[in-house]
Image: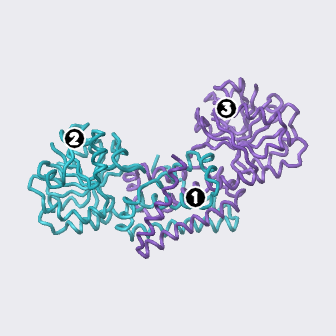
Chain colours: A cyan, B purple
Amino acid sequence: MIVAVVGVGLIGGSLAISLKEKGVANWIIGVDNNEENLRKAQELHIIDEASNLEDAMKRSQLVILAIPVDALLKSLGSILDMAQPNHVIMDVGSTKKALLHVAANHANRGRFVAAHPMAGTEYSGPEAAVRNLFQQKTMVLCDVKNSDEDAVELIESVVDRLNMRTVYMNAEEHDLHTAYVSHISHITSFALALTVLKKEKEQGRIFELASGGFESTVRLAKSSPDMWVPIFKHNRNNVLDVLEEHINQLEQMKQLLQNEDYDTFYKLIQKSNKIRKILK
Amino acid sequence: MIVAVVGVGLIGGSLAISLKEKGVANWIIGVDNNEENLRKAQELHIIDEASNLEDAMKRSQLVILAIPVDALLKSLGSILDMAQPNHVIMDVGSTKKALLHVAANHANRGRFVAAHPMAGTEYSGPEAAVRNLFQQKTMVLCDVKNSDEDAVELIESVVDRLNMRTVYMNAEEHDLHTAYVSHISHITSFALALTVLKKEKEQGRIFELASGGFESTVRLAKSSPDMWVPIFKHNRNNVLDVLEEHINQLEQMKQLLQNEDYDTFYKLIQKSNKIRKILK
């Protein structure tokens, strides 16, 4: 199968590598507004050739849209305009409600499958693409009832070949749950980096003292604003809601410390330990 | 050298393993109030024998205190009372100011070296002990000017054998910097777990959707309250100070989202990205 990957960054690039490796794709056409990224993706043999969107769509069966969610919102309509009956178009964006609203009444809506692989790293660009990023991870498919059956079946078989679990949700559920399980983690990590960079005047000390714990809570703060600002923008209400709760939890801890109420603090930590059962 | 390890949990146990492996210790005597932990440590061959504190001190040259900081504060005086001129006593606690205040005027203060290895995991107990936990990590030595020269030299050589870097600070600096680089990470992780456990009513969704990002920001929430409440208690002012700043940063992000000021949000994320330069 010929696959067009639009956006050859971390996710698009990693998908390209895996699809080739698993034998899903025998030829990958890369498309990217950023010429430099396109050149790098080719140099790194992540894609077989570089082309423009029109040409890539004409010659491929599966089209994967792996661009930031704001760019996706802007271009999905015109991409669907170009869709042929044999095309399957899949996105991998982190927010879904606004996107599926855009797609809703399009004549070619059925050829589109909204997907979100729950996998990534804090790095971006084609150099960040890695093999096995998706292994044993979850692929969320949204509102599949509005996609054509054969399109969903193709995507399901691709997901299966990638050794991923499939989870089905509607767009609202998706945006709600990802706010809890992904978006808030990025907010806290950005805020933690800002906190430490502001308080710690001797930055050499961070380097000397940072151990695994600090690194793991702060590593997401290396993530690109180009990707994350659009996500926060398009999932604003859910993110605000969970952010408010997070601030409340921190305020409560602050109060307990101020009041030296260590017994209640102990119980709070015990309660938070319940995450052990869920994350193993 | 015979080494007594008081507290055979994650840190004490991991040190015992490494000291034996690197040839620093040829016999390790374990001491622990928790009989079950002591038995497990012996079963796992982390210690060579179990004994009580008095006996262990009598027969060892190096005594490592690896118990929670509140227990350490209570017992350091009586441990120093038992110190002989050839003893070197080292702690590995996460807060130092209160501890060194307790030790300050003790006749045997010179035999004590205050140390803090910047390494750990979210697990506890002897089963959590792992080899190579300290490899290439930092050991902070505090107020070494108040320790006898030969005692500091012995500890420095041990740290060297463990393949660790040594960093010197006074107790106040230590407690300040660790609040920034370690303690606040635990607070945010506990609070994040509580946030998600409260907001996400469908806990199966956390399991399905959680990817590396969520796991890394929340994993410290598995940490034991027995270890962490005493740390927050004894570093209360510094922790409160950095926690307040962290809440401010989150409040600022909330405001920006509420006002839909995505340009400023973008700049904030760019600023937080500077952590890349420090953490590589």
Q: Which mark lies nearer to you, 1 or 3?
A: 1
Residue A113 position in % (x across, y down): 21, 56
Q: Position of residue A134 (x, y in %)?
A: 33, 44
Residue bearing the label numbered 2: A48
A57 horizontally vs A184: left or right: left
Labels 1 and 3 within one chain? no
Q: Residue at x 22, y 48 (%)?
A: A156
Mark 3 residue crowding within 10 angstroms, few (<14) / some (14–19) / many (20+): many
Q: Position of residue B141 (x, y in %)?
A: 73, 43
- Neighbourhood count class around disc 1 (C-alpha, 10 Å): few under 14, some 14–19, many 20 upward: some
Asked which secondary structure carries label 3, the reply is helix
A38 or B178, which lies in front? A38
Q: Quadrant of the N terminus of chain B?
A: top right
Label 2: how many residues lie within 10 Å, few (<14), some (14-19) or many (20+)? some
* Residue type indicated by callout 2: Asp
The part of the image, by quadrant, that contains residue A2 is top left
Residue B36 visible in the displayed image: no
Q: Nearer the viewer, mark 3 or mark 2?
A: 2
Residue A197: mark: 1
Check disc 1 and report its element: helix, strand or loop: helix
Specify the amino acid type for callout 1.
Answer: Leu
Q: How far is mark 3 from mark 2, CA to CA? A: 53 Å
Task: State how far apart marks 2 and 1 are (Cα).
Answer: 42 Å
Sequence-wise first label, 2 or 1: 2
Q: Going by the image, does B103 lie left or right of B122?
A: right
The structure residue drawn at horizontal position 78% and vertical position 54%, both measured from the top left corner, is B98
Find disc 3 in the rendering and name its residue: B16
Q: Under tag 2, what secondary structure?
A: loop
Q: Position of residue A73 (x, y in %)?
A: 26, 65
